[in-house]
Image: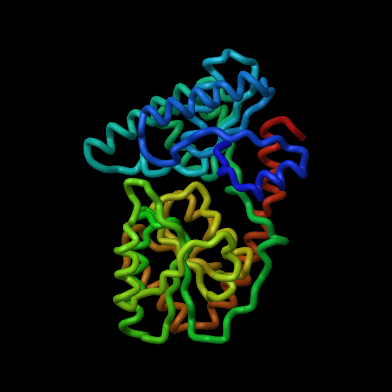
């Protein structure tokens, strides 16, 4: 639910015998009129197609889809896939606490009759149980969204000085400011090291203005390469993948980089910590700690043999735990479809 009206996606779905119905949704923000429009649009769709089963993922489709199903009083089985807690659950001031309380209540109402709630990491599950959003018996954990190991294949490393890469929407809680600071620290010591940043702007309240990102480029800390629909060429041009995020469900870009044989530096934070065995396929660092991030980066500069060794382990871990077919089978089994 909630896919953009991409003609190529619609055409591909149609070739698979899948009907596509769009509905209005404002991905970020808390505009009541926009959210009510989403609720009533979903209610109308469910009334029309009378589904036997609904799987919703990401916050607004889960909340408004769950409430729409409840309001119709149907026998449709509702499943929710929690792909991360998002901005609403992060600590903050009074406004943030009010938002967190509101979202908690909405989740609780929407999931009251959910058959199962599927999480991508145990940390998120524990938050939902602690807030009494859902009981433990209805919770299931899977290994993220998985990664297509045939699409993301091992790529040779560039014949150059180490290149570090981050791919993320331009959000503060992705740790991009820490990435820029750490990059500047490293550039001051090793001017020939390259840092890339790839990702689109984001309208979220936590969005980083493009002007700020360009200032990092102007200072020489990193190169901003804009947004992309295919991350593989960028991963192929890098040696080490970095994601200093404050929280994730399970970071897809990390899994994609691992599948392509890249070592990873990420944070010891929910979701992120599930992808890296510290010292094995990369390094874990504290959130919001640019110095620790720079120190981890420097290990790959001082000990370049770690790049190939840890990159090989990343691919092995991706094959063992994050194969998309294994993850999809877990979800289908949870929904009683296999």
Q: Establish if 22 lies above or below 328.
A: above
| Residue 212 locus on image (x, y percent) | 30, 64
Residue furthest top as drawn:
73
Which quadrant holds the N terminus? top right
| Residue 20 locus on image (x, y percent) | 66, 36
Q: Can residue 291 be seen from the camera position used here?
A: no
Q: Establish if 261 lies above or below 88.
A: below
Place residue 49 in its image quadrant. Answer: top right
**Residue at image point 42% right, 53% down:** 269
Q: Establish if 134 lies above or below 147.
A: above
| Residue 229 locus on image (x, y percent) | 57, 59
Q: Nearer the viewer, residue 303 or 67?
A: 67
Place residue 298 in its image quadrant. Answer: bottom left
Q: Establish if 228 lies above or below 128.
A: below
| Residue 223 locus on image (x, y percent) | 41, 74
**Residue at image point 49% right, 62% down:** 227
**Residue at image point 48% right, 55% down:** 273
Horizontal arrangement in the rendering, residue 56 relative to residue 269 (left or right): right
**Residue at image point 41% right, 56% down:** 201
Residue furthest front as drawn:
7
Q: Can residue 171 be seen from the camera position used here?
A: yes
Horizontal arrangement in the rendering, residue 2 relative to residue 88 (left or right): right
Q: How is the image coloured?
A: rainbow
């Amino acid at each position: 639910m909630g896919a953009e009206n991409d003609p190529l996606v619609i055409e591909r779905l149609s070739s698979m015998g899948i009907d596509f119905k769009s509905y209005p949704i404002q991905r970020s923000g808390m505009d009541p009129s926009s959210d009510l429009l989403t609720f009533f649009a979903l209610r109308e769709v469910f009334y029309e197609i009378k589904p036997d089963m609904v799987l919703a993922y990401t916050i607004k489709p889960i909340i408004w889809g769950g409430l729409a199903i409840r309001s119709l009083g149907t026998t449709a089985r509702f499943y929710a896939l929690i792909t991360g807690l998002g901005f609403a659950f992060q600590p903050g001031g009074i406004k943030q606490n009010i938002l967190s309380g509101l979202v908690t209540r909405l989740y609780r109402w929407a999931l009251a009759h959910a058959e199962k709630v599927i999480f991508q990491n145990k940390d998120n599950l524990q938050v939902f149980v602690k807030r009494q959003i859902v009981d433990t018996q209805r919770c299931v954990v899977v290994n993220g969204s998985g990664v297509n190991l045939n699409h993301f294949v091992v790529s040779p490393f560039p014949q150059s000085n180490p290149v570090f890469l981050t791919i993320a929407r331009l959000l503060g809680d992705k740790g991009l400011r820490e990435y820029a600071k750490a990059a500047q620290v490293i550039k001051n010591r090793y001017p020939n090291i390259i840092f890339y940043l790839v990702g689109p702007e984001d309208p979220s309240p936590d969005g980083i203005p493009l002007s700020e990102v360009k200032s990092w480029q102007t200072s020489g800390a990193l190169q901003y390469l804009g947004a992309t629909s295919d991350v593989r060429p960028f991963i192929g041009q890098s040696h080490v993948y970095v994601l200093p995020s404050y929280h994730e469900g399970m970071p897809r870009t990390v899994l994609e980089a691992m599948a392509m044989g890249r070592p990873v530096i990420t944070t010891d934070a929910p979701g992120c910590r599930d992808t890296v065995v510290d010292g094995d396929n990369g390094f874990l660092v504290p959130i919001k700690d640019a110095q620790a991030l720079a120190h981890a980066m420097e290990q790959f500069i001082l000990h370049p043999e770690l790049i190939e060794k840890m990159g090989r382990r990343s691919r092995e871990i991706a094959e063992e735990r994050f194969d998309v077919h294994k993850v999809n089978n877990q979800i289908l089994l949870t929904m009683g479809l296999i």
